Image (cartoon, coloured by chain):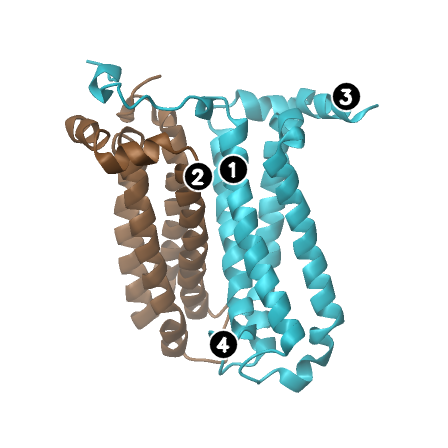
């Protein structure tokens, strides 16, 4: 992984991102805007299952309203996320937070799909917590040293 | 006491010091801040998109507002509290930061926008509640709201990049990453 990160950091795309100071903050900002759409889309489906919102419509109707927005925002997150990895390979790929986040993104998306069709309440609580966990891990990529020896990040 | 004196006093409080000195507190507050702000933006966007006639158009506007407004306020409170706590740790630097000032100004504008909407289009909500889109005043408020909140997110990220010491160093493309890693 270290070798891959090293190679990636020398690619033309990576060098372009690295040498333009405004690129990373811009990509991160777009990433956060998309997180807002993804989080609330998942929450609206989850809240409907729990009966907290949208009780005037069925779970299927709520899912039809928010699932496409969740998928679209995840697409934006994937692209902006990939650009951040290209721009700062070591920061991302050697961070424990990054890999835990990737696992939770798959788990969270699968759980949301599941509860949007089955309406399982206890699983919905877990689903909401997974999405919050994804945001925490995303921010913690910047603070991966908090994992101590578990982090693969270069100790600066 | 002048402003800089007050800011220094805020930074000197035990609360600010304990957040600064903790390995976990600042990242924890920042993560909660992101949870709060993404929820504020997302919930407000649901209502704005309804008023613009883009999404949820078959449901009454009042129904959408009922669904999201309480969550927007809860999330805003979470964002404000965590933001204030982060501010105390480095008050002087944040106060003088251009992006911080722009962000605060935009938050005030977002508040004014809500107020104007409440005093205009919302008063006649009963007449357009089930229409596919809001009248002009409502659509204008929704557009301004979306643009402001997206800009606020951008400003917030720029505060992080212009106030933290670590981000001052640019990566040198000529440095081989493997040389930096522990052998």
- The Cα–Cα distance between marks 3 and 2, rounded to whole angstroms, is 32 Å
Q: Which mark is residue B158?
A: 1
Q: Tell which circle, 4 or 2, labels the residue nearer the N-terminal end.
A: 2
Screen quadrant of the N terminus of chain B? top right
Q: Which mark is residue B5?
A: 3
The answer to which image quadrant residue B4 occupies is top right
- The Cα–Cα distance between marks 4 and 1, rounded to whole angstroms, is 39 Å
Q: Colour of chain B?
A: cyan
Disc 1 is attached to a residue of which chain?
B
- Residue B102 relative to residue B157: left or right: right
Q: Nearer the viewer, mark 4 or mark 2?
A: 2
Say which residue label 2 marks.
A25
Tell whether label 2 touches label 1 (CB within 8 Å).
Answer: yes
User: Does residue B58 appear in this view?
Assistant: yes
The residue tagged with tag 4: helix, strand or loop?
loop
- The Cα–Cα distance between marks 1 and 2, rounded to whole angstroms, is 6 Å
Q: Are marks 4 and 2 on the same chain?
A: yes
């Amino acid at each position: 992984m270290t070798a891959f990160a090293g190679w990636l950091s020398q690619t033309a795309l990576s060098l372009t991102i690295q040498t333009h100071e405004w690129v990373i903050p811009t990509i991160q900002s777009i990433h956060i805007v998309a997180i807002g759409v993804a989080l609330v889309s998942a929450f609206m489906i989850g809240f409907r299952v729990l009966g907290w919102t949208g009780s005037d419509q069925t779970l299927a109707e709520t899912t039809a309203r928010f699932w496409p927005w969740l998928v679209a925002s995840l697409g934006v997150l994937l692209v902006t996320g990939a650009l951040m990895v290209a721009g700062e390979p070591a920061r991302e790929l050697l961070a424990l937070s990054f890999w835990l986040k990737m696992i939770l993104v798959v788990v969270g998306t699968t759980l949301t799909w599941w509860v949007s069709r089955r309406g399982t309440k206890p699983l919905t609580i877990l689903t909401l917590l997974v999405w919050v966990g994804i945001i925490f891990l995303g921010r913690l990529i910047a603070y991966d040293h908090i994992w101590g020896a578990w982090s693969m990040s270069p100790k600066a | 006491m002048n402003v800089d004196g007050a800011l220094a006093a805020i930074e000197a409080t035990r609360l600010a010091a304990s957040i600064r000195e903790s390995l976990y507190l600042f990242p924890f507050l920042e993560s909660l801040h992101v949870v709060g702000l993404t929820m504020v933006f997302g919930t407000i966007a649901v209502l704005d998109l309804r008023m613009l006639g883009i999404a949820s158009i078959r449901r009454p506007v009042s129904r959408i507002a009922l669904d999201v407004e309480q969550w927007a306020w809860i999330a805003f409170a979470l964002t404000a509290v965590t933001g204030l706590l982060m501010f105390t740790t480095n008050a002087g630097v944040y106060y003088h930061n251009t992006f911080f000032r722009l962000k605060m100004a935009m938050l005030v504008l977002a508040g004014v926008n809500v107020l104007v909407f409440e005093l205009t289009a919302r008063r006649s909500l009963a007449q357009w509640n089930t229409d596919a889109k809001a009248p002009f005043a409502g659509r204008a408020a929704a557009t301004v709201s979306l643009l402001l909140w997206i800009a606020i997110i951008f400003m917030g990220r720029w505060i992080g990049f212009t106030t933290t010491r670590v981000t001052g160093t640019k990566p040198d493309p000529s440095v081989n990453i493997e040389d930096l890693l522990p052998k």
